[in-house]
Image (cartoon, rainbow, N blue to C red):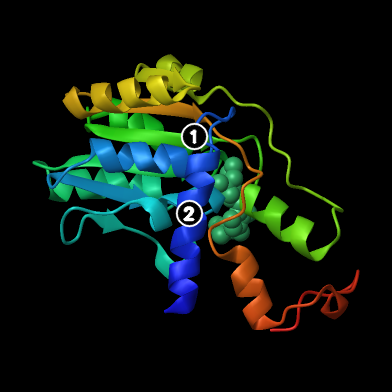
Amino acid sequence: MEIKRQVAEEIEREIETHKNSSPLHPGVVAEILNSTLGEDSILVLDCGLSTFWVRDVYKSPCVRGVLSPGGYESMGFALPASIATKIVYPEKKVFAVIGDGGLLMSYSDLPTLVENNINVAIVVFNDSKYGQIWQLQKKLFGDRFIAVDLQKIDFARIFEAIGGKSISAETVDEVKAAFNEAMGSDRPVLIDVKTDFRYNAPGSDLLIQNQDLEIGHITDEGSPRP
Ligand SMILES: Cc1ncc(C[n+]2csc(CCOP(=O)(O)OP(=O)(O)O)c2C)c(N)n1
Ligand SMILES: [Mg+2]
């Protein structure tokens, strides 16, 4: 219970401190989801740092309001899962939250949205990184990074090229306006939000302290001991 309280305080502090930061803090974007989505919405999560923020900040106003790959952590889940969700629950407003890495693993499904006019809002947290892996490497390998950089990809232009409606958002006001537009849309919309990978997931430090995970357990050859 003590850890739960500390994590809740950490989230509140982070969002307050970074409410005007640029690029956007993923927790700040998650708060905007809180004020936009309602009981008639379903939020579908992918895997990664951004989705951890959304998972911990988003307060679903209804039962079965969130669909997630859970502990399986499968990147690429949210886009096809959001298509299926909309087909099963056509009366619901479906938002998918996906990192740029996760969307790169699944974006061949984007034409399906347009071709069949499946009214889902795809929200890309675009930080040009495998953010979660960057955080892990920073924590465990003393700032030595490998294979965590992604190209700066303009997903809005990709979706437009397919024939879809897209919006790029870099500020709180732009994100609010984009989410509201998606809520009122009868077409699929892709919202490309520029986010920052430098904010580790809520409770990460507490978790590592409690697992007693030390850098001494890692070698160049091996992974952390389970
Ligand atoms: C299919 C698959 N491959 C690899 C991983 C390991 N993995 C977990 S998070 C992550 C990076 C996620 O990057 P992105 O989707 O951009 O989200 P971010 O962490 O940047 O928010 C990777 C490679 C995974 N969970 N699933
Ligand atoms: Mg990313």
Q: Answer left or right for 201 relative to 223.
A: left
> Type of residue at label 1?
Lys
Q: Rounded to the nearest whole Å, what is the CA distance between mark 1 and mark 2?
A: 12 Å
Mark 1 — residue? Answer: 19
Mark 1: give few (<14), some (14-19) or many (20+) Cα within 10 Å.
Answer: some
Which label sits on residue 11? 2
Q: Answer left or right for 191 relative to 182.
A: right
Q: Residue placed at 45% from the left, 51% from the top?
A: 12
Q: Residue placed at 91% from the left, 69% from the top?
A: 220
Q: Answer left or right for 116 relative to 11.
A: left
> Type of residue at label 2?
Ile
The N terminus sits in image quarter:
bottom left
**Secondary element at image label 1:** loop
The x and y percentages for residue 18 are 54, 37
Q: Residue furthest left?
A: 91
Q: Quadrant of residue 119?
A: top left
The C terminus sits in image quarter:
bottom right
Q: Residue placed at 22% from the left, 33% from the top?
A: 118
The x and y percentages for residue 47 are 49, 55
30 above or below 61?
above
Mark 2: give few (<14), some (14-19) or many (20+) Cα within 10 Å.
Answer: many
